[in-house]
Amino acid sequence: PEYARSPRRRAPRPGDKWHLDEVFVNIGGVRKYLWRAVDQHGKVLDILIQGKRDGKAATRFFRTLLKKQGCRPRVLITDKLASYQVAHRQTMSATEHRHNKYLNNRCENSHQPTRQREHAMKGFRTVGSAQRFLSSFSRISPHFRPPRHRMTATAHRTELTTRFRVWDQVTEQTLAA
């Protein structure tokens, strides 16, 4: 968590277009729902694990998201889950809401690193540990995944070297304190 807070402080403000999605995860053999919000640049805004996928759970996620971000989006993009419409009416009725099966691919793709990590860890044991880990992991993971398709191999190596240097500085400062 300490390492995850450092990149968050330096990060620019989130974009004005938010993509929201939920996916199920098995935690200790019980199905839970992982709610995730991503802006149009692919930056993870918030993650919340809950036991249900109803309107009350969606409203809780919207409220925690708004509280952490401190601003409202211009556009909210979700899939066709009816719970999002309930939460949208109660918390962000002035925001434009687009719900379409295909507009939400940015958020669907942001679940992939979580699934890979979940598989490597052989699942999560408790909701609390999963919430703590995924909140930190979603902040740290993109630091080591630059947009490879947009740069040459030399630029990619240079970028990774720079990012690892920054990571070493952040971790050394935390260990020294």
Image (cartoon, rainbow, N blue to C red):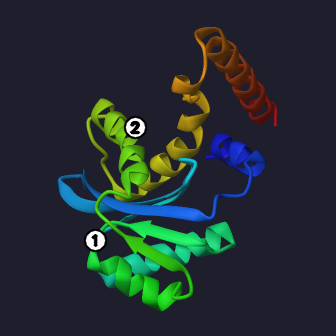
The answer to which image quadrant residue 119 occupies is top left
Q: How many marks?
A: 2
Along the line of sight, the residue nearer the viewer: 129 or 79: 79
Q: Which residue is mark 1?
A: 80
Q: Is residue 66 above or below residue 11?
A: below
On the image, the x and y values in percent for residue 44 come to 54, 52
Residue at x 19%, y 59% (from the top left corner): 30
The mark lying in front, picked from 1 and 2, is 1
The disc label shown at residue 136, or none: none
Q: Position of residue 83 (x, y in %)?
A: 31, 79
As helix, strand or loop, the secondary structure at mark 1 comes to loop
Between disc 1 and disc 2, whose residue precedes?
1
Image quarter of the C terminus: top right
Q: Is residue 67 above or below residue 27?
A: below
Residue placed most toward the observer, 20 or 105:
105
Q: Residues within 10 Å of mark 2 (few under 14, many from 20)?
A: some
Q: Alpha carbon of mark 1 to alpha carbon of mark 2: how far?
A: 23 Å
The amino acid pointed to by label 1 is Lys
Where's residue 115, x and y in %? 32, 40
> Dot 1: within a 10 Å radius of its alpha carbon, few (fewer than 14), some, or many (20 or more) residues?
some
The residue beneath circle 2 is: 113
User: Hey, which residue is sitting farthest top in the picture?
Assistant: 154
Residue drawn at (38%, 44%), measured in percent from left and top?
Answer: 109
Identify residue type, mark 2: Pro
Q: Is residue 145 above or below residue 158?
A: below
- Labelled pair 1, 2 in contact (Cβ < 8 Å): no
Q: Secondary structure at mark 2?
A: helix
